Image (cartoon, helix red, strand yellow):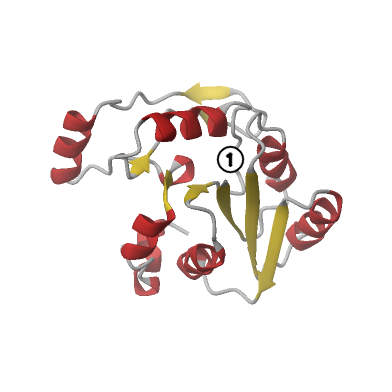
Amino acid sequence: PLDILMPVYNADRYLESAVRSILDQTFRDFRLIVVNDGSTDGSLAILQRLAARDHSIHLISRPNTGILGALNDLLAAATAPLVARMDADDLALPDRLARQVAFKHAHPEVVLLGCQYEIIDGRHRRLFAPRRHTDDGPLQTEALGGVPPEVHHCDKCRLDAARAGGGDDTAAEDAEGQ
């Protein structure tokens, strides 16, 4: 099983597409845990409607604490041995989770797994697709040089490793870029 963690704050413009891209995955053994972080737009209504139709959505709604607080609450709510991140304004290709889970099962020593991604505009037009390294050596070299080795919205990792990291420091809210 897999828990997908999605923080949401005022994302009504893209939210339904993001959630549907998870619900339409070829891999189905998951729970989508969503924290509505005090949205003041239509996000909560969208989430309530989708959660009423699909019981794989676990909705938590509470006052705004910022994205790092939301991420910590999501991590606390997770119970599956594997967790994946998804942002409320992102889209996942239909086989994203299946491919990541298959890779993780074939390589149990891997703690954190990322993915390739494309930057699109509001009309789903491809703007560019950064190419990332796919093997450990160059990723570690970049990480030691200060370049983040992964993009958080396509992370997948072991829950025990994520919790061992201690969660996100909510005093560093600006580092997340919200």
Percent x, y of residue 125 = 61, 23
Percent x, y of residue 136 = 22, 32
Q: Residue at x 53, y 66 (%)?
A: 70
**Of 62 and 40, the residue lying toward us:** 62
Q: Residue at x 63, y 45 (%)?
A: 30
- Residue 78 is left or right of residue 124, and the answer is left
Q: Report which residue position mark 1 lands on.
A: 90
- Residue 70 is left or right of residue 170, and the answer is right
Looking at the rendered structure, the secondary structure element under dot 1 is loop
Q: Residue at x 61, y 49 (%)?
A: 88
- Residue 107 is left or right of residue 67, and the answer is left
Q: In the figure, 58 relative to 142: above or below? A: below
**Image-quadrant location for residue 29:** top right
Local crowd size for mark 1, using a 10 Å CA cut-off: few (<14), some (14–19), many (≥20): some
**Of 127 and 95, the residue lying toward us:** 95
**Of 10 and 131, the residue lying toward us:** 131
Residue 26, visible in the rendered structure: yes
Q: In the figure, 91 relative to 127: above or below? A: below
